Amino acid sequence: MSASVVRLFQVGKRYSERYALKNVSFSLREGEFVYITGVSGAGKSTLLKLLFAMERPSEGQVVVNSSDISRLGKRALPGFRQRVGFVFQDFKLLPDLTVFDNVALPLDVRKTSAADVEYRVNGVLSLVGLGDRGNDYPTSLSGGEQQRVAIARSVVSRPSLLLADEPTGNLDSRNAREIMSLFREICSMGTTVCIATHDEFLMNEYPARKIELEQGTILSDNRAEFL
Amino acid sequence: MRPLHSLRRSFQDFRRHPWLHGLSIVTIAISLLILGVFLVVYRNFVHLADHASPTPIGTAYLQEGLNELEVNNLSDRILGMEGVRDVEFKTRKSVLEELANFYGDSTVDPSGVEGFFPNLLEIHLRETVNEHSLKRLADQISSFPEVTQVDFARGWQAQFKRLKNVMSWIGLALMAGLLLGCSFIIANFMGMRHQSRRRDIEIIHLMGASRRYILMPFLWEGMLEGLMGVGVAVLALIVLNSVFLVPLAKQWGGMAGIDQFAFLSPSQIAYMVGTGLVMALIGSVTVFIRIREN
Ligand SMILES: Nc1ncnc2c1ncn2[C@@H]1O[C@H](COP(=O)(O)OP(=O)(O)OP(=O)(O)O)[C@@H](O)[C@H]1O
Ligand SMILES: [Mg+2]
């Protein structure tokens, strides 16, 4: 049907002698919504890091937006990152920038016009329910609010692939639901969304393809159900 | 890109690390102050020399036993030569008196050394006389039989020129030395700030920032530090000038025929601005190299 945004072929990731991922193969289509799940230590974060070129595979091939991660040069990295959004498990907000400036960062690095930045940042901030917190600093926000800032920042540049590592980990169920429907909405606009989570409740409420990892290998992939 | 966004990020860093930035600025200011003091001294040295000797003066030492007619005749011939403005006859007696005045009466006993000093003609030249015609003039005058020896103070001028050259070289060496030393120190401060911003830089990198985007604030910081350092140095020089040089000139300037010392010329200030900026920029550039290594 549509082109694959992500393609992994027999991917292995080793830290010293231990495998965090081993023999992982799957692909994600444009606009697909997928959960990466598994117990703690199964390799979810490692997998997302490979997709964001924060780590290089030890074996096999990882292709994202037609870029082979193993062959991605230093010069190509900024351009590659600009097309992929990432919600980090530890948020990675800049404490010295306001919420607005934090969210504007992915636009600033791409030389977006001031008016466009203003419009889009305010847009996503109200989308995550922080429309009136733009001038605050991250340290003055609660954990859940910081998480929503991180989410706003990851989608503000309308990436073709959105990766999220436990994006609802710090949210109450009401906020978690809102965030999930936000991800759904982004997905419906054509972005491929890939969420690492072990929140069974959410996965049941918003059913989608689920790739389950166990000790670094794929235990199950219900891809067929969502074709 | 929002206008001067990187400049704003620099200002934020000035607020975050006031001490590190302050130290860089003080480093630049102190070294520029040294440079500035040297430039002021150099400028006044040149000025003073110009004042002290607006035109060269020559001395023609005469044979013993010339009569007044012969002396007048010689004076007229020299006065008729190109480049000569005035000729003044001085007897050994008047020369000795001048000397005695200069050294204080007791040190020289005119009667004792009278024999060593011949009568002489003091030759005042026009300002237009150059090195070349000076030599021709000296050759011509020394060929007159009434003249034993001609001294055109060329030695003194050459000495002055040499001294001026030496000072220029000292100035250049001083600048190069300060430039190197300062850049090294600033580079270290910059490195410390880069270190403290490591986490931030990593995050910005993850947002897809290019090297240029990450490094621009460091360049701005370098420029701002350089400019502020120059500002502090020039202000300090102005204060030093009004506290020391102005009263000094009032008290002693009269002796050298000047009523005030010269301050920095606009081109010298431009020179300091340039040096300050180069210092700070060399410091910033090392951050580029550091980041390349990562
Ligand atoms: N940088 C690293 N160096 C060494 N080992 C690592 C590194 N990163 C991850 N690992 C190991 O790889 C395995 C998978 O880790 P990963 O973070 O991917 O798990 P996870 O599924 O995200 O777990 P969690 O749900 O707790 O976040 C773990 O055993 C971990 O110890
Ligand atoms: Mg994890």
Image: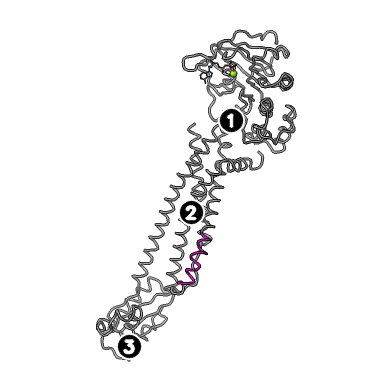
Reading the image, the residue beneath label 1 is B203
The answer to whether B87 appears left or right of A42 in the picture is: left
Calculate the distance from the C-alpha at mark 2 to the C-alpha at mark 3.
Answer: 58 Å
- Which percent across, then down, holds residue A20? 53, 15
When the figure is inspected, residue A172 is found, relative to residue B115, above or below; the finding is above
Calculate the distance from the C-alpha at mark 3 to the C-alpha at mark 1.
Answer: 93 Å
Calculate the distance from the C-alpha at mark 2 to the C-alpha at mark 1.
Answer: 37 Å
The answer to whether B69 appears left or right of B240 in the picture is: left
- Which percent across, then down, holds residue B166? 38, 60
Q: Is residue B7 magenta?
A: no
Whether residue A133 is visible to the viewer of this picture, yes or no, is yes
Q: Earlier in the sequence, mark 2 or mark 3?
A: 2
The secondary structure making up most of the magenta span is helix
Viewer-nearest of discs 3 and 1: 1
Q: Which residues are magenta?
A: B237-252
Image-quarter location of ligand 1: top right
Asked if badges 2 and 1 are on one and the same chain, I answer yes
Q: Amino acid at mark 2?
A: Leu
Residue at image location 55% in from the left, 38% down from the top? B215
Residue at image location 54% in from the left, 57% down from the top? B235
Q: For numbered disc 2, what is the local secondary structure?
A: helix
Q: Amino acid at mark 1?
A: Ile
The answer to whether B259 appears left or right of A122 in the picture is: left
Label drawn at residue B71: 3
The answer to whether A194 appears left or right of B19 in the picture is: right
